[in-house]
Image (tube, rainbow, N blue to C red):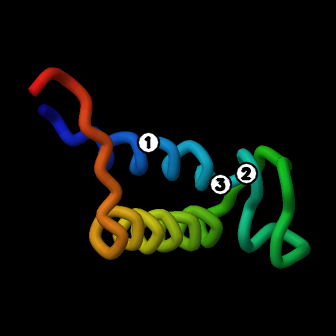
Amino acid sequence: MQDWGPVFISFVLFILLSPGLLFQMPAKSRLIAFGNFQTSAVSILVHTILFFALDAIFLVAIGVQIQLGSD
């Protein structure tokens, strides 16, 4: 049986936290902008820190596990 939790959680967070896709933080003129499809170096850094923090919370602290395959 394989644990696909880390793969699935990391994939979903990577898509959702891509700068400019759903939101961008910090934006060019505001703190946060939604759906503008633009990015900057500071925004990439902030989204990277958010990604690793949320990934660590979901995988280490909560311990999300998704078991697939036959036993």
**Identity of the residue drawn at 12% across and 32% down:** 1
Q: Report how far apart the C-alphas of labels 1 and 2 lie in the structure.
A: 17 Å
Callout 2 amino acid: Gly
Q: Report how far apart the C-alphas of labels 1 and 3 lie in the structure.
A: 15 Å
Q: Depth-wise, is mark 1 or mark 2 nearer the camera? A: 1
Q: Is 6 or 62 nearer to us in this picture?
A: 62
**In this picture, residue 5 sits left or right of residue 22:** left
From the top left corner, tell me how far across and down residue 43 is, in percent: 64, 67
**Identity of the residue drawn at 31% across and 42% down:** 66
Q: Report how far apart the C-alphas of labels 3 and 2 lie in the structure.
A: 4 Å
Residue at image mark 3: 19
Callout 1 amino acid: Phe
Q: Is 14 or 30 nearer to us in this picture?
A: 14
* Badge 3 vs badge 2, beta-carbon distance below 8 Å: yes
**In this picture, residue 71 sits left or right of residue 58:** left
Q: Depth-wise, is mark 1 or mark 3 nearer the camera? A: 1
Point out which mark residue 20 bears.
Answer: 2
**Identity of the residue drawn at 25% across and 29% down:** 68
* Label 3: element kind: loop
